[in-house]
Each structure stands twice: as C-alpha cells, then as structure tokens.
Image: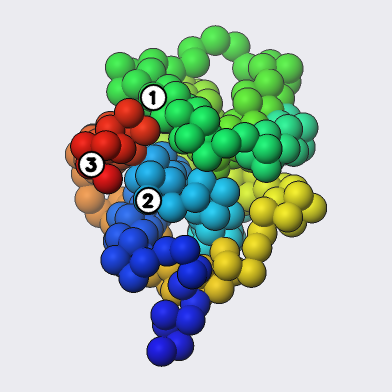
Amino acid sequence: MIITGLIPTDISLNVAIAICAIALVSGIARGFSGFGSALIFMPLASSIAAPRLVAALLLIIDFVGSAPLIPNAWKRADRKATAIMTLGALVGVPIGTWLLSRLEPVTTRWIISVFVFALLLLLSGWRYRGKEHAAISIGIGGLSGFCSGLAQTGGPPIVGYWLGRPIASVIQRANIVLFFAASDFFSLVSYALTGLITADAIRFSIIVGPIYAVGVWFGASLFGRASENLFRSICYALIAAAVLIGLPALDGVLR
C-alpha cells in the first residue's frame, strides 16, 4: 500500500497511528494558543519512536501546518519586539541541534522531560513581570531556540515571558506565532545541515502533516469562541499527562 510505504521501516503501523493521534491533539493546542504542540507531541512520540525522527517530523509538519497562522500574526504582532527576541534564537537553535545530533536517545528523552516540566512554572501562574530589556528578550529567545533545536520544546520560556507583558492577548498570541515561525525556519536550516531532515521524516510527514494541519485549523477556529482559560487548562493538563506518560523511567511499565 502507498500509505505503508511512507511509514519508516522501524515503525509499526500501530505506532504510526498513535503518532497521528498525538499530532492531531498537538495541532489543536497549537492552533488555539499558538504553542503547546511540542510539549504534548515530543514526550509521547519520542517514547515510541526515535527522538531524532520525531523532532524532525514535528518540525516539518509544524512549519507547514502553522503557515496559515502567519499572515494574521504578522498584522497583529509587535514585530520589533519579536525581531529582537528572534536574534537569540539564531544562536540557540544551532547549539540545540548540534546536541540532538550527538546525544543518545534515552538521554534526549530525559532532557525533553526536564524541558517540559518547566511548564510547571506556567501552571503555577509564574510570569515575567519585570521591565522589558533587549538583553533579556535576546536571552529568552536564545533559551527558547536552544530548546527548540534540541527537542522542539521552546514554548515555556517564550510563553512565560509574553504572557507576563501588559499587552492584549491577541498581540501576545501573534508574537508567539511569529517568533516560532522564525525559529522553525532556523531549525529547518540547522536540521538540514546536520542531516536530521531525513527521507524517512519527509515521507512520514506526508501522512502526519495533514492530520496535524486539521488540528491546527480546528484549534484556530476555536480561538475567540471557546473559553480561553478553560482551553488553556485543558492544554496544561494534556501536557502534564504527556510528560508523565513519556518518562523513560516508565518504559518497563507502559511500553
């Protein structure tokens, strides 16, 4: 069959179906809030497939699937503030990518879990409330870029910063979407140069990508209609569950 021919040989059909289901839920979170896809996708998908493959897969499908969000984000975002933060990602993304290309899979999974546990700061209501300085913005962009390069999990630093700014939620979301559009581009270049964008990842994205895109579209259609606080709470609960389920320490129990 054509579909099975697009699935990497080291991944079973059941695993492929599970990854597609994870991508759908991740896409809904991404479309609604502008972030959260990697924090759900990476812990779960990397527990059933190679972290290098699923990181490259997520990068490809997120870059393509979230493209429709960019024009609206470009209109609404504070482009100057976002550009300053993007400078940090230019440095952070290549460093994270270099580590991903060299670390053992289990080590990478533990790091992913630690990164995602940073979301607990957001769950506790933490936000950066200090003054806005270019150096701080570049540093946060660099940290997010590093997390994105290593595991596509650059959300917590950016979200914790932008949600603490005294600006409208529409602008906050637009800034986040626009930053990750740039960060994803940097990651694509870095992944390609280090050989992480493989033929397997590209072929598999043909299956997973449309499913993820449907999720992004559905999530975006909910923005402004559904309760933002309720939806964010659901996203946080899904992310927390993804971290726990994806912990390497539970491999002998759950996988």
Q: Which residue is mark 2?
A: 48
**Position of residue 77 measured from the top left corner of the image (x, y, whole percent):** 58, 44
- Left or right: residue 99 compared with residue 91: left
Mark before the other along the chain sequence, 1 or 2: 2
Estimate the spatial distance between the alpha carbons at disc 1 and disc 3, rounded to whole Å: 20 Å
Q: Callout 3: 10 Å neighbours few (<14), some, many (20+)?
A: few
Q: Image height check: is 86 above or below 14? A: above
Q: Image height check: is 117 above or below 40? A: above
Q: Please tell me which residue is depicted at 44% across the width and 24% down the height of the picture.
A: 114
Estimate the spatial distance between the alpha carbons at disc 1 and disc 2, rounded to whole Å: 19 Å
Q: Which residue is mark 3?
A: 254
Q: Quadrant of residue 203 in the image?
A: bottom right
Q: Do the residues bearing badges 1 and 3 touch, measured as CB atoms within 8 Å?
A: no
The amino acid type of the residue labelled 2 equals Ile
- Quadrant holding the C terminus: top left
Of residues 78 and 186, the one nearer the viewer is 186
- Left or right: residue 1 compared with residue 143: left
Q: Callout 2: 10 Å neighbours few (<14), some, many (20+)?
A: some
Q: Please tell me which residue is depicted at 79% across the width and 53% down the height of the picture.
A: 193
- Left or right: residue 68 compared with residue 15: right
Q: Secondary structure at mark 1?
A: helix
Q: Which residue is mark 1?
A: 117
The amino acid type of the residue labelled 1 equals Phe
**Position of residue 253 measured from the top left corner of the image (x, y, whole percent):** 21, 37
**Position of residue 33 measured from the top left corner of the image (x, y, whole percent):** 39, 45
- Quadrant holding the N terminus: bottom left
